[in-house]
């Protein structure tokens, strides 16, 4: 019996949208970051909330066999519609083309190997490389767009594993909406633990820096094990993950926030004590962290977490979002606040919109 994956529709131009995610328990440190393996193997399980407004939009169109892939970058496309495609930065083009090669290679194991090129136009609805997991949404959108353009309908599990093969571990978690854990049992893909309707939370991203970070998360992952605090971190993580899981399942916001903020600081403790050290924080980060503590002192349940960047994700419940946003926008170092919340899974539709 031939069990190769069959295409579900005709190849053709498509547009995919994939959400970013904010990790409540972080993936930091990996075993296999090099080469063209199946993707990084993390030292610990991570757990994230999928976002709604912060997303990547990617159009893919087939090009004839023998064509070079064309990669265009679209600055913060609004609602998926923009025709202002620009030439993308060389490093981005190279990483994107490598992933397209991987996807063509993957298609060779299916019933419809694809040997053509792609025209890709992609962008994020939020600032890239600033600690808002643009690689997670970006590679998930690219994987979904290219696979749909080749004629395939991937299951979320397949999308998760293929997106992770890009080298971005957090991309494994953007294949689902709601709350997602990676890796699941066999290590390849992520798994949804609660869907987006189970509990709506807000993520107000206080943007204190919009430039690209100076040390990539890949380098941060590489350096993590050099921190003397890495082993104690791993030892503490099972317990912290369990606290997050049970707070989510029991809808206990204070217990969740407590564990999430502790974890957000822990990632940076490891980064700052790695050799050589990595400092992602800026003075604005400290100002926002202080404001979040003040909000709590005033009785507002708000908790902070940061990925590999200076910007601060402030997690709160929908009823408090207005008050939290008001406090954040009033801070001198906050350029703007992106208002986001628990989001659904990636989607695609026919037609190249970018
Ligand atoms: O997905 P990567 O390989 O770029 O790693 C990013 C890891 C963090 O965003 C810092 C944490 C996480 O779990 O998302």
Image: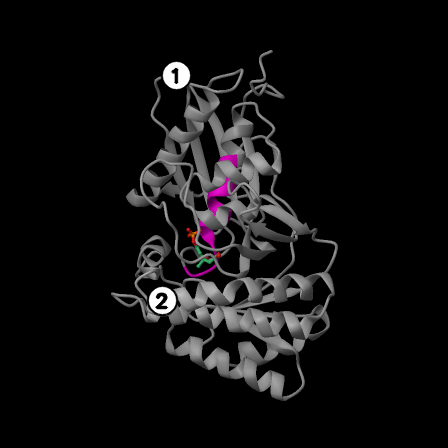
**Residue at label 1?**
65
**Residue at label 2?**
271
Comparing 87 with 150, the one in front is 150
Determine the residue located farthest toward the left in the rendered image: 276
> Residue 126, percent across and down?
49, 56
> Residue 94, percent across and down?
31, 38
Q: Is residue 293 in sight in this rendering?
A: yes
Query: Which element carries disc 1, helix, strand or loop?
Result: loop
Q: Is residue 117 above or below residue 216?
A: above
Residue at image position (55%, 37%) is 159
Comparing 214 with 233, the one in front is 233
Comparing 122 with 27, the one in front is 27
Q: Is residue 306 above or below residue 218?
A: below
Magenta stretch encompasses residue 14:
no
Give the residues drawn in magenta, as a range. Answer: 130-143
Residue at image position (73%, 72%) is 319
Residue at image position (34%, 44%) is 92
Query: Which element carries disc 2, helix, strand or loop?
Result: helix
* Foreground disc of the pair 2, 1: 2
> Residue 34, percent across and down?
31, 43
> Residue 50, percent across and down?
60, 54
Q: Main secondary structure of the magenta part?
A: helix
Please state, as top left, top right, bottom left or bottom right, where the N terminus lies in the image.
top right
Q: Is residue 70 above or below residue 318?
A: above
Q: On residue 229, which mark appears? A: none
Determine the residue located farthest toward the top in the rendered image: 1
Name the quarter showing ligand 1. bottom left
């Amino acid at each position: 019996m031939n069990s190769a994956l069959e295409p579900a529709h005709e190849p053709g131009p498509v547009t995919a949208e994939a959400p970013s995610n904010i990790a409540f328990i972080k993936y930091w440190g990996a075993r296999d970051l090099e080469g063209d393996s199946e993707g990084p193997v993390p030292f610990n399980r991570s757990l994230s909330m999928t976002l709604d407004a912060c997303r990547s939009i990617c159009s893919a169109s087939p090009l004839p066999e023998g064509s070079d892939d064309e990669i265009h970058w679209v600055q913060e496309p609004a609602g998926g519609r923009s025709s202002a495609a620009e030439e993308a930065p060389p490093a981005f083009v190279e990483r994107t083309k490598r992933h397209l090669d991987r996807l063509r290679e993957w298609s060779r194991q299916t019933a419809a190997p694809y040997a053509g090129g792609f025209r890709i136009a992609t962008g994020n609805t939020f600032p890239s490389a600033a600690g808002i997991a643009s690689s997670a949404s970006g590679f998930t959108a690219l994987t979904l767009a290219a696979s749909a353009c080749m004629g395939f309908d991937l299951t979320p599990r397949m999308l998760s594993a293929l997106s992770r093969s890009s080298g971005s571990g957090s991309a494994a978690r953007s294949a689902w909406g709601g709350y997602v854990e990676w890796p699941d049992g066999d290590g390849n893909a992520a798994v949804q633990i609660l869907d987006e309707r189970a509990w709506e939370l807000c993520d107000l991203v206080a943007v204190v820096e919009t430039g690209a970070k100076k040390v990539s998360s890949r380098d941060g992952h590489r350096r993590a094990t050099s921190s003397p605090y890495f082993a104690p971190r791993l030892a503490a993580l099972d317990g912290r993950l369990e606290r997050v899981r049970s707070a989510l399942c029991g809808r206990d916001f204070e217990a969740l926030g407590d564990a999430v903020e502790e974890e957000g600081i822990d990632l940076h403790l490891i980064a700052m004590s790695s050799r050589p050290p990595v400092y992602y924080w800026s003075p604005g980060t400290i100002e926002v962290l202080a404001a979040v503590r003040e909000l709590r002192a005033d009785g507002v349940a708000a908790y902070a977490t940061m990925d590999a960047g200076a910007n601060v994700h402030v997690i709160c419940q929908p009823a408090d979002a207005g008050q939290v946003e008001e406090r954040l926008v009033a801070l001198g170092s906050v350029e703007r606040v992106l208002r986001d919340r628990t989001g659904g899974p990636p989607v695609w539709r026919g037609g190249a919109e970018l």
